[in-house]
Image (cartoon, coloured by chain):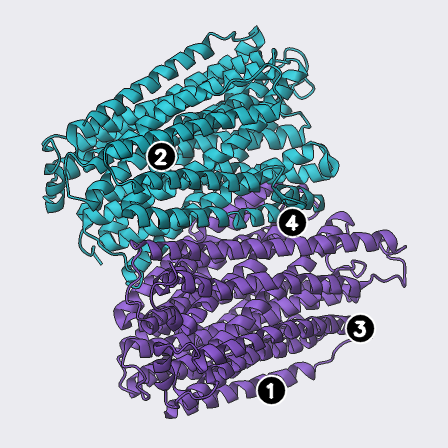
Chain colours: A purple, B cyan
Amino acid sequence: MISIYMSILAGFVGLLAALILARKVITQPAGNNEVTDIGKLIQEGAMAFLKKEYMILSIFVVAIFVILTVLIDFNLLGNDKIDQLSSGGRVSLNGPWTAIAYLFGALGSGLAGFIGMNIAVRGNTRTATAAQKGLNQALRVAFNSGAVMGMTVVGIGIIGVSTLWLIFQNPTVIAGFGFGASSIALFARVGGGIYTKAADVGADLVGKVEAGLPEDDPRNPAVIADNVGDNVGDVAGMGADLFESYAGSIIATISLAFAAGVMFDVSAPKAILPLAIAGIGIISSILGTFLIRTSDNADMGKLLWTLRYGIFGAGILSLIGTGIYVQYNNLDFNLFWVVLTGIVVGQVIGTATEIFTSYEGLKIGSWNFNPVEWIAKQSQTGHSSTIIAGISVGFYSTAIPAIAIVCAIYIANELAGLYGIGLAAVGMLSTLGITLATDAYGPVADNAGGIAEQAHLEPEVRQRTDALDALGNTTAATGKGFAIGSAVLTALALLAAFGAVTGVTQLDLLKPKVLIGTILGALLPFIFSGLTMQAVGTAAGSMIEEVRRQFREIPGLREGKPGVKPDAAKAVAISTAGSLKAMIAPGLISILAPIVVGVILGAEALGGLLAGSIVAGFLLAIFMANAGGAWDNAKKYIELGHFGGKGSDTHSAAVTGDTVGDPFKDTSGPSLNILLKLMAIVSLIFGPLFIGSGLL
Amino acid sequence: MISIYMSILAGFVGLLAALILARKVITQPAGNNEVTDIGKLIQEGAMAFLKKEYMILSIFVVAIFVILTVLIDFNLLGNDKIDQLSSGGRVSLNGPWTAIAYLFGALGSGLAGFIGMNIAVRGNTRTATAAQKGLNQALRVAFNSGAVMGMTVVGIGIIGVSTLWLIFQNPTVIAGFGFGASSIALFARVGGGIYTKAADVGADLVGKVEAGLPEDDPRNPAVIADNVGDNVGDVAGMGADLFESYAGSIIATISLAFAAGVMFDVSAPKAILPLAIAGIGIISSILGTFLIRTSDNADMGKLLWTLRYGIFGAGILSLIGTGIYVQYNNLDFNLFWVVLTGIVVGQVIGTATEIFTSYEGLKIGSWNFNPVEWIAKQSQTGHSSTIIAGISVGFYSTAIPAIAIVCAIYIANELAGLYGIGLAAVGMLSTLGITLATDAYGPVADNAGGIAEQAHLEPEVRQRTDALDALGNTTAATGKGFAIGSAVLTALALLAAFGAVTGVTQLDLLKPKVLIGTILGALLPFIFSGLTMQAVGTAAGSMIEEVRRQFREIPGLREGKPGVKPDAAKAVAISTAGSLKAMIAPGLISILAPIVVGVILGAEALGGLLAGSIVAGFLLAIFMANAGGAWDNAKKYIELGHFGGKGSDTHSAAVTGDTVGDPFKDTSGPSLNILLKLMAIVSLIFGPLFIGSGLL
C-alpha cells in the first residue's frame, strides 16, 4: 500500500516540476510588440477553439455520465456480472463511482491539454525571442515548454489512477477513468487534427503555391489559423492523447492483474506494480531533464545527442528503479525483463520510424537504404510519382514495427502471461514525462518560426527555429514509436481483460460470429480514416476559398501594401467551425460500434471486433504516420538543394506529397491509436451487458 | 457420378463456344495496313513478354513440382497425417499425383491467359476496324473477344477439376491443381500489372503531361508498350486470375465437404454439388450471350442494358438450374438459398463499387451521394486535394462490401455451416463465363482506341471505342465485386478446410501465438502492396527516362516529322525486364510466408496468419480498387467539360489522381485477392507438416 502513496507523491513531484518549468518559461522576455501582438492572436484563437470544443464535449460527457450511472453504477438492468464486479472492490459501489471516475478522467485529459496549450502559446513567442540570442537559448525555452506538458500529463495521470485505486480498488472504477480520458482524447485528437491540417493545407495551397508567398507570410490570411492549429492539434491534442495512453496502459495492466489472478485481492502486488513503475518513471524523467545541458556553441548534432542523453538517462534510471523495486518486493524477476522488453521494443519502433522518415535512412558500410531520398528522387517525375513512392514506403514501413510488436507479445507472454503484455506497455511509457517533452517542443519551435516570419525578425532567427523544428522531427519519431507500440499493447491488454470480465475465454476465428466481428473491427479504422481525411479535405476546401476570397476582395493584400492586413479571425472561425462539426461522427462511431455489435452479435463477436480493430488499426496507423513523415522530409530534403531545390518542379511535386501526408500523419494516423483503446475500454466497461450471444 | 460427367461435358461445350466465338472474331476484317502493322507490334511485344514470363515461371514450377513430389506425394518426412490424407481417396496415391495436379493447374492457368491474350491482340485491331462501321459492330467484336476468354477459363477450369476428382476423389490432389492455378495467377497478375502500369504511367507522364501529346499519340515511344501492357496485364493477367478464382472456389468447397462430413465418402453429394453448379453456370452463360442482341442504332444506355440482360439472364437460368438440381437430388434446399445469397452479395458489392466509381453515384430523389463528382470538385484546389479526396473515398468505400460479406458469412453459415461459405463463392462465380466476357472486353476496346489513334483513323472511331471503354468500366465494376467477394469467401472456406485437415479446431485470438499469426498475416498485404507499388514506381521511372531520352536524341520525333518513328521496341524491352524482375519478390513472399510461420510457430499461428491476411487483404483490396476507379472516372468526368474540362489545372490535378490510381486498381489491388487464396492453399497442402506448435 505504501507504494501507492509513493506513486501519488511522485505525481505531485511531477506537477511541482511542471510548475517550476512553467515559471522558467513565463519569466523569459516575451519579445517586441509585433511578436506579442501575433502571439496574442494565436493565443486567442486557440483558447476560443478550446472553449467551444470543451462546450460541445461537456454535453457528451454529461450524457455518458448519466448512462454510466444508470447502467453500470446502479445496474438498472439488473445484470449479475455487473453486480458482482461492483461489489468486489474495497469500497462497495453504492454510488455513481464509475461515472465520477469517468468525469475525472475526462477532466484530467482536458486539463492536460489545456495546461499544455496554455504554456505552449506563451512558449512560442518566447522561443522566437530567445532565438534572437542563439540556438541553445531557444532550445531551452522550447524544451521547457514541452516538459511542462510532459510533467503535467504524467503527474495528473498517476495521481488520478492511484487515488481512485487507493479508495476503491475496483477495476471497473479505474476503467471509468480510462474511458473519460480516452473519449476526450479521441475528440481532441480528431478535432484538433482536422483543425490544424485544414488550416495548414489551406495556407500552403493558396498562399505558397498559388500566390507564391513564402511560408508563414503575414499577408496569408490562413497563417494565424495555421499557428493556432499547431497549438490545438499538435499540442493540446497530443497532450490529451498521451494522457490517455499513459493512464490507459496502467489501467489495462491493473485490470489484467485481477483478471489473471484472484479476483479483487486488494493487496495484489501485481496491481500495484504498474503504479510503482510509473512513479519511478516520473522521478527518473525529472532527473533526466537535468542531463540536458549544452554549451552555448553547440551544433545540431550535439543538441540531438544531449536530448538523447536525457531520454536515455531517464530510461536507465527507470529500469534500475524498477529492478530494485521488483527485487525488494520479492516479485518474480521476470517482470523486470518484461519492462525492459517494452522499453527496447519502443526504441526499435522509434528507430525504424527514423530510418523510414529521416534524410539519412540506414547506412551500413557502403549500403544505404534511404526511402526519403528515393521519394525525393521519384518526385523528379511528377506529382503522381511522389505519391506512389510515399504510399509504397508507408506500406512496407509497417514491417519492422509489426515484427517488433509480435516479439514483444511473445516475450512478454512467455515471461508473465497476458499480464506481461500490459506491463510491457507500462514500461514503454514509464519515462513519458521526458519523451513527451521532446515530442511537444517541436510544435512550439515550429510556431516560433512562424511568429519570427510574421514579425519580420532577422533571418537567422528563422534558421534557428527551423533547425529546432527539424531536430524535433527526429526526436518525435521515437515518441511516435512509443505511442503506437504502447497503444497496441495496451489495447491487447484491455482485450484480455475484457475476455476475463465477460467470461469469454476464447475468441475462435473459426466461429463465424467471431470472424464477423473481426472483419467489422478491421473495417472501422478504414471508415474512421476515410471520415477524418474527408473532413480535412472539406475543411481545407472552405479555407482555400476564404483565402482566395480575401486576396481577391481586400485591395493591396497580395502586394503587401503597408497597413493592409488579412482578416485572420475569419479564417480562424472557419477552421474552428469545420473541425468541431467534423469530429462528431468519427467520435460517435468509436463509442457506438462496440455497443451495437455487443447488443446484436454478443460478447464473442465484440471480442473479435476489438481484435480486428487493433490489428488493422495498428498497421494503418503506422502506414499513415510513416508515409506522412517520409513525404515531409522528402520535401525538406529537396529544399536543402537536392534534385533541383526550392522552386523546382521536383519541389512542387514534393509539396503535394507533404500536403497529402499532413492529414495522414497528424490527423488520421494518431487518432487511430486512440480509437483502438477507446473501443477496448468501452467494451471492458459495458461488456458484462453483452454476455450471451446477442440478438442474432 | 453422372453429374461429374455432365460437368465435364459442360466444360467441353464451353470450349466449343469459345472456338466458335474465336472464329467469329478472327474472320472479321483485320483492317488497313497501318492498323495491322501496329497490331503486329503489339502482338509481338505481348508474346515476347509472355514467353519470357513463362520461362521464368517454368523454373519455379519445376521446383514446386519436386517439393510436392518429395514432401507430399512420397511423404519423405513420414508425416502420419499426410499418409492418411493420401491413402484416403478413391485411388491410393502411390505416385506424384498432387505434383502432377499442380502442373495441370499451372498449365491451365497459363493456357487460359495465353488463349485469352491471343484472341485479344487480334480482337483489338478488328474492333478498331469494326468501329469504322458503327458502335454496335465494334461492341460485338470486342465482346466476342472477351467471351472467348470467359468460356476458355471456365471450360478449362471445370474440365481440370472434374477430371481430377473423377480419377482420384482426393482433396489433396485437387488442392494441388488449385495451388498451380494460384501461383501462376499471382505471378501473372503482379508481373502483368507492373508491366501495364509502368508503361501507362510512363506514357502519360512524359507524353501527355510533358510533351503535350494527346493520348496514344504514335510519336510517344511508350504507347506501344502501353498497349502491350493492356494485353499482358488486363487480359492475360486477369484470365489467369479468374481461372484461379473459379477453380479455387470449387476446390475449397469440395475440400470443406469432406472436412465437414465423413472423410472420403466417395459418393458425397456435397462434393459433387459445386461441380454441378459450375456446369449449370457454363450452359447458362452460353445461353446468356444469345440475349445480347442490339439494333444497329442502339445508344449507350441500350448497350449497357443489353449487356446487363445477358448477365442477368444467365444468373436467373443458373439459379433455376441449381434449384432443379438440388430438388431432384434430394439435397437440403437450404443449399439453393446459399447459392442465391452468394449471387445477391456479389451483386451488392458490384453495385457499391459502381456507386463509388461512377459519374452518377447514388441518387435517391433529390439526395445525391456522388464521390466521383466530389473528387472532381476537390481537384479544383490542386493535386494534393485530389489525392486526399480519393484516398478518403477509397477508405470508406470499404463499408458496404465488408458488411455485405459479413451478411453472406452469417447467412451461409446459418443455412449450411462453413461449407455454405464456400458454396456461396461457387454460386457467385457460376456465371463467370459471361461476367468475365463483359470484364475482358474493356481492355480490347481500350486498345482498339489506341490503335485507331495511332493509325490515324477517323475521329468518330476513337469516340466509339471510348464509349465502349467507358461502358466496359461500368460492367467491370460488377465483375470486380464478384472477384473480391468470391476471393474472401473462397479463402475463408480454404481456412476452414485447413483447420479440418490439420486438426486445428479453434483459432483462439486470446492465445498469443494465434494473435501473433494474425498480426503477421495482416502485415503481409501491406508489405505486398508496398512492394508492388514500388515496382511500378521504379519501372515507370525507367520508362520515363527512356521516353525523355528518345525525345531528346531522335531528331524530329517530338515535332512529328514524317518518317520519324520512336524506338517502341526499346520501351517494350524496358517494361518487360522491369516487371519480370519485380514480380519475383512479392510472389515468393506469398508462398514462403505460410511455410516459415508454420515451421517456426506451428499450425495455430499459421491459421491466424491466414485469417489476418484475409481480413486485411480484403479491405486493402477494396480500398485500392475503389480509390483507383473513382480517380479514373473523376478525371473522365472533368474531361466531359466539368470544372474547367480538359487542359485546365483541375484536369491536371485529376490526371495525378488517375495516375496514382492506376497501380492501385490494376496492380496491387487485384493481386491481393490472389495473395489470400494462394497463402490459404499453400497452408492447406503443407499444413499437415506443421501440426504441433512449431519450433518456438
- Crowd tier of the residue under label 4, counting other residues whose Cα lies within 10 Å: few below 14, some 14–19, many 20 or above: many
Task: Calculate the distance from the C-alpha at mark 2 to the C-alpha at mark 3.
Answer: 66 Å
Determine whether label 3 and label 4 are within 8 Å by CB: no
Q: Are marks 2 and 4 in contact (CB under 8 Å)?
A: no
On whether disc 3 and disc 1 are found on a single subunit, the reply is yes
Q: Is residue A591 visible?
A: yes
Q: Disc 3 marks which amino acid?
A: Asp
Q: Earlier in the sequence, mark 3 or mark 1?
A: 1
Marked residue chain, label 4: A
| Secondary structure found at label 4 | helix
Kindly report which numbered mark, 2 or 4, lies closer to the viewer in this rendering: 2
Q: Amino acid at mark 1?
A: Ile
How far apart are labels 2 and 4 at the CA level?
41 Å
**Is B671 left, or right, of B623 in this rendering?**
left
Q: What label does residue A37 carry, if any?
A: 3
**In front here: A56 or B332?**
B332
Q: Which mark is residue B245?
A: 2
Badge 4 is on which residue? A655
SS at circle 1: helix
Q: What residue appears at the point 42 percent right and 17 percent down from the top-left corner?
A: B118
**Front-most of residues B235 and B300:** B300
* Residue A20 marker: 1
Foreground: B414 or B209?
B414
Measure the C-alpha gap from mark 3 to mark 1.
Answer: 26 Å
- How far from the left and from the top, in percent, is residue B623? 50, 45
Check disc 3: other Cα within 10 Å, few if <14, some if 14-19, many if 20+.
Answer: some
